[in-house]
């Protein structure tokens, strides 16, 4: 089964139908770049990995689009698709957590906020996890933590390089301490991966914040990011109020972090696959059939 067929079956055409409708009907043919206000033809935008050809603005994409962009065709095999979250605390704020979960599952076709699997990038085997901001802001709950941990352990046992695409607002508050425990669990698995001399690369996309930044997003051998991605722990306003001073305009952007040594490389989305292939070969990984 191809990657497209697998997603289409899993989503029951929710995602595919929506994209066709927006790009083929009426005003959906055209859009405006939120960065430069340039009017863009949506088909051209989609063909350019949802990157504005005028200013280079990287529009947010979902996990399906991300996987199709990064991995070799028909090479993605998903892992742990049966895992689904529960409501251990019976949590309720303005709405019940159980209701929020059901709504996110229906709107995205996902069981939780990350997809994991084994794939190939330029014929090199790779373990990959892709977070999706659409699912409750990409928040990290117990299932997200468990799936990422299992992916890391599989990569370690099979001596595979590992890539985790981060897009998250942080730990999922509705699961309390159980969500915070995922930070330590994932970090421990990454340490065992490192001790086995296996490569780990996090890809930081817009946004990567909170407990994800405070754990696996910053533990890579090579930390790469997309241009102008928001990367940080606490919000800008909280930091300014705590420090009682004005922060630089580009604070918490990928470019700011690159200048200050927190990110190793900023890679445009259109060059990600070829660059990943080069990095994997540079670290001794070879093509396999």
Image (cartoon, rainbow, N blue to C red):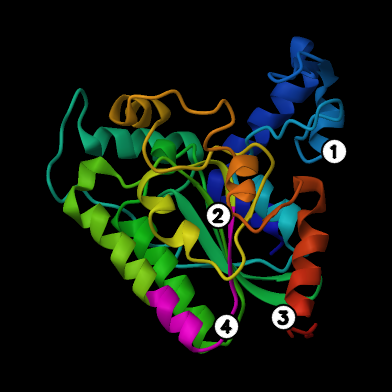
Is the N terminus in the top left, top right, bottom left or bottom right quadrant? bottom right
Q: Label 3 to label 2, Cα distance in Å?
A: 21 Å
Q: Which residues are drawn in magenta? A: 189-203
Q: Label 4 to label 2, Cα distance in Å?
A: 21 Å
Task: Residue 17: name its quadrant.
Answer: top right
Q: Which residue is mark 4?
A: 198
Tell me whether the residue at label 3 lies in contact with that at label 4, contact meaning CB atoms closer than 8 angstroms: no
Q: Which residue is mark 1?
A: 47
Which residue is depicted at the point 57% across and 25% down? 249
Dot 1, crowdedness within 10 Å: few (<14), some or many (≥20)?
few
Upstream in sequence: badge 3 or badge 4: 4
Placement of 160 over or under 174, stated as above or below: below
Observer-side mark, 4 or 1, equals: 4
Instruction: For mark 4, give the secondary structure.
Output: loop
Q: Which residue is mark 2?
A: 262
Mark drawn on residue 283: 3
Placement of 186 over or under 180, stated as above or below: below
């Amino acid at each position: 089964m191809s990657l497209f067929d697998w997603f289409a079956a899993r989503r029951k055409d929710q995602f595919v139908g929506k994209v066709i409708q927006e790009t083929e009907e009426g005003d959906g043919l055209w859009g405006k770049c939120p960065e430069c206000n340039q009017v863009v033809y949506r088909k051209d935008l989609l063909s350019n990995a949802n990157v504005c050809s005028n200013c280079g603005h990287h529009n947010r994409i979902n996990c399906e689009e991300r996987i199709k962009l990064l991995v070799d065709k028909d090479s993605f095999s998903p892992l742990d698709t049966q895992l689904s979250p529960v409501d251990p605390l019976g949590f309720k704020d303005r709405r019940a957590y159980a209701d929020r979960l059901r709504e996110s599952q229906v709107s995205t076709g996902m069981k939780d906020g990350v997809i994991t699997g084994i794939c190939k990038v330029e014929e090199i085997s790779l373990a990959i996890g892709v977070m999706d901001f659409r699912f409750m802001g990409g928040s990290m709950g117990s299932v997200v933590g468990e799936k990422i941990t299992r992916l890391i352990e599989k990569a370690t046992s099979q001596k595979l390089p590992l890539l985790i695409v981060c897009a998250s607002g942080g730990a999922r508050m509705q699961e309390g301490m159980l969500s915070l425990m995922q930070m330590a669990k994932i970090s421990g698995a990454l340490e065992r991966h490192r001790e086995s001399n296996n490569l780990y690369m996090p890809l930081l996309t817009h946004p990567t914040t909170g407990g994800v930044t405070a754990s696996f997003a910053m533990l890579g051998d090579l930390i790469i990011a997309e241009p102008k991605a928001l990367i940080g722990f606490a919000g800008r306003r909280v930091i300014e109020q705590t420090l009682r001073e004005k922060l630089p305009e580009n604070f918490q952007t990928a470019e700011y972090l690159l200048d200050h040594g927190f990110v190793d490389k900023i890679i445009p989305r259109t060059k990600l696959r070829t660059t990943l292939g080069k990095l994997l070969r540079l670290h001794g990984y070879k093509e396999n059939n």
